Image: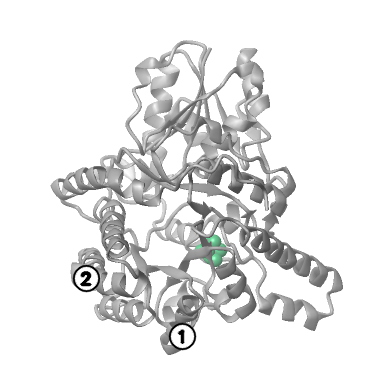
Amino acid sequence: MTTYLLNPSHVSFGIGVITPRWLYVLAAATPPAFGTPRLVDETLEAFDAAVIKAGDIVGIGIHTGNALRGYELGVAARAAGAYVVFGGIHATLFPEEAHTLGGAHAVVTGDGEHAWPEVLRDCASGAPRRQYDGGRIEGDTFLGGRWDLLPPGRYMWGSVQTVRGCPKHCSFCSVWRTDGQRPRQRPYQQVVEEIVELRRRGFRFIALADDNFYPVTLEDLRMAARRGDRTQLRRLEQLRSDRFALMEELAQLPDDTVFFTQITMEAAEDAEFLQFMKRAHIKGALVGVESVTKEGLKSIYKNFNESGESLVTRLRSFRENGIHVLGSFIFGLPGDNLDSFDATLKVAEAADLTFAQFVMLTPFPGTLDFAAWEKSLGEDPERIGGIPINRHWLIPQSQRPKIYTAHPTMTAEQIRVGTQQVWDDFYSLPRIWKRASVACVSLKGRLAFVLISKIYRQMYANTGIATDSARVSRSARWARLMARPCRRLFAGPPMPELQLP
Ligand code: SF4
């Protein structure tokens, strides 16, 4: 009997950017009696389900974007006589779908690592339950990954999680509803141990794969103090001081270590936090800017973001503290118009963003936007190939629309073309070179910057936005080709002797 853990993907690049952490965490949760699980990441290469045998146990983790491929694998595994178990955000939201379309024997909802041993035992005894509730486990019981199982030379970045949950409530995001709004912070000593292990293995670049690395803002503290809520204030202060303790430890790691994380823009007003981030080698952060206008931010419940000039000032303060920003923007918000594309590009440049991503508003399940959109479709929504569009993730990739919500002033095609154009402009060679000249001192560094920018653009823009399938496969081929030399730029020398700070 073999236990498989599968990370599905309809497109493979040969090299992965960030290690899919969940595979390695569930491997750590697998009791020794079940042997070492076989970890399969289809972002590296497609998996041949013909190797699955009767009696094997196949765990498949899905989010909305890869659910369809996950169901294909589940059906094939079940047909081969294996036990099929689904987990992940999408299975948490739609457990029945995994049963009806993915051949599931069992579905684990919520956090999977504590439920997984029980699921395995039940499968081994031939009696898996239909559903297991993994719940939301506390930070001090998060597991580290079995990094000894990493295939050598296949990933650019390691990944470690320091906190789950986000106190915000953005309407397009499902994180606060699935992972909860109470930050569940992992004890910093455990985080550091895992990071040191990855550094020993030669990972110089490590993603702190958190929902929000800055879970307590200065405003949260002010509000708790104003309300006279001492218990809440103490809780928030403890969370904050644990963040600082973590960053103190990270600061003692070798100087060439680089961390990247996700953070809200409010961190920019917290000078002390930014200085600690810098010392801790946190050199990059994804910041959800989303919209450059007040109306756009209001429409997605993200009023805590700045707009206009103060937005530029906020974003620049990350750079002034040595933190490169990957700004994330959404197009297709109700207040957007044909000028929004150019206006956004101008802000991205004025704010000195090192990287940027531009996505089209998509109603993802589990979000407030999805609930409102689904309701607006009525009883009999439009169908594509027989599939109602409120189940858009089940529509084959090539026929899937790029835009779902009717926009008051733009057609879907205008939004798609405008988005593609901003990607093309932001990642044009002269613009990349200009950014490279500011971000990197050496010629080698600048060339590496150009390569990384181009590959990022190919992987995330052309394979997601283009409707022309030839362009999509050309981009995937190009990214495949370039990913290998790119990985070498990120690798560091293994440091087996490295001690805990
Ligand atoms: S988009 Fe970011 S800040 Fe908003 S709820 Fe999601 S994780 Fe939190």
Q: Which dot marks residue 136?
A: none
Q: Residue at x 57, y 62 (%)?
A: 212
Q: Residues within 10 Å of mark 1 (few under 14, many from 20)?
A: some
Q: Which residue is mark 1?
A: 313
Amino acid of disc 2: Asp
Q: Which residue is mark 2?
A: 425
Q: Residue furthest front?
A: 497
Q: Report if residue 270 is visible in the image.
A: no
Marked residue nearer the N-terminal end (1 or 2): 1
When the figure is inspected, residue 69 is found, relative to residue 233, above or below; the finding is above
| Label 1 residue SS | helix
Q: Report x, y in % for residue 157.
A: 45, 48
Q: Residue at x 74, y 67 (%)?
A: 241
> Which of 25/53 is in front?
25
Q: Report if residue 21 is visible in the image.
A: yes
Q: Is residue 20 left or right of residue 176?
A: left
Image quarter for ligand 1: bottom right
Measure how far apart labels 1 and 2 are at the Cα level: 22 Å
Q: Residue at x 39, y 27 (%)?
A: 73
User: Residue 385 sits in which quadrant?
Assistant: top left
